[in-house]
Amino acid sequence: SYILVGIDEIQQELDDQIVRTQAMRGSRFVKPFLKRTSTWEYTLVELQDIIDNWLKVQASWLYLEPIFSSDDIMKQIPTEGRLFKSVNQVWMDSMAMTAAEPGVLQVARRPGLLESLKAANARLDRIQKGLNDYLETKRLAFPRFFF
């Protein structure tokens, strides 16, 4: 699977563009361009939300993927395992589409991407909580796991 790397430059440029767009919208000369600047600002802010959610999904996915690749774990916590499979599918699909069409604006305008990333983050939080509860029961059964 692919992962997002080297995104610092994109985030810096995105921040700069948002500040510039907001400065333009504050100008008294913006009237003829108000619709275009508003649309552009909306696109930039949405892109920032997409990147933030994407990086959060990526961090959690990278942590959980090796854990849930084990059949033993999938059998012991099947609910979280099913949730992880659905998140994994969203991740794989999103990354495959991005690799096929890597343009930032194409990604920003992809329908449903932000919503699917937010839903994946919510599922990953539930998975993490379920995994922590499972590990806690194992620690209570085997006190030597407290280290």
Image (tube, grey):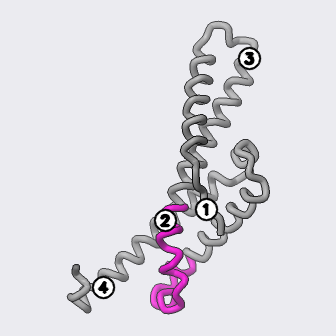
Is-magenta flag for residue 70?
Answer: yes
Q: Write the residue at 61% across / 72% down.
A: 88
Query: x, y percentage for residue 132?
Result: 36, 75
Is-magenta flag for residue 76?
Answer: yes
Q: CA distance from mark 4 to mark 3?
A: 60 Å
Indicate the quadrant where residue 45 lies.
Answer: top right
Q: CA distance from mark 2 to mark 3?
A: 41 Å
Q: What type is the residue that disc 1 sits on?
A: Ile
Q: Quadrant of the C terminus?
A: bottom left
Look at the picture and state if 104 lies above or below 130.
above
Q: Left of 78 or right of it: where is 14?
A: right
Secondary structure under badge 3? helix
Q: What type is the residue that disc 2 sits on?
A: Ser
Query: x, y percentage for residue 47?
Result: 63, 42
* Residue that mark 1 sits on: 3
Q: CA distance from mark 1 to mark 4?
A: 33 Å
Indicate the quadrant where residue 30 lies.
Answer: top right
Secondary structure under badge 4? helix
Q: What type is the residue that disc 3 sits on?
A: Phe
Q: Left of 87 or right of it: where is 108?
A: right
Looking at the rendered image, the disc whose residue lies closer to the viewer, 1 or 4, is 1
* Residue that mark 2 sits on: 60
Looking at the rendered image, the disc whose residue lies closer to the viewer, 2 or 3, is 2
Q: CA distance from mark 1 to mark 2?
A: 12 Å
* Residue that mark 4 sits on: 137
Looking at the rendered image, the disc whose residue lies closer to the viewer, 1 or 2, is 1
Tell me where the magenta segment starts and ends, as one range.
58-83
Query: x, y percentage for residue 78?
Result: 51, 85
* Residue that mark 3 sits on: 33
Secondary structure under badge 2? helix
Q: CA distance from mark 4 to mark 2?
A: 22 Å
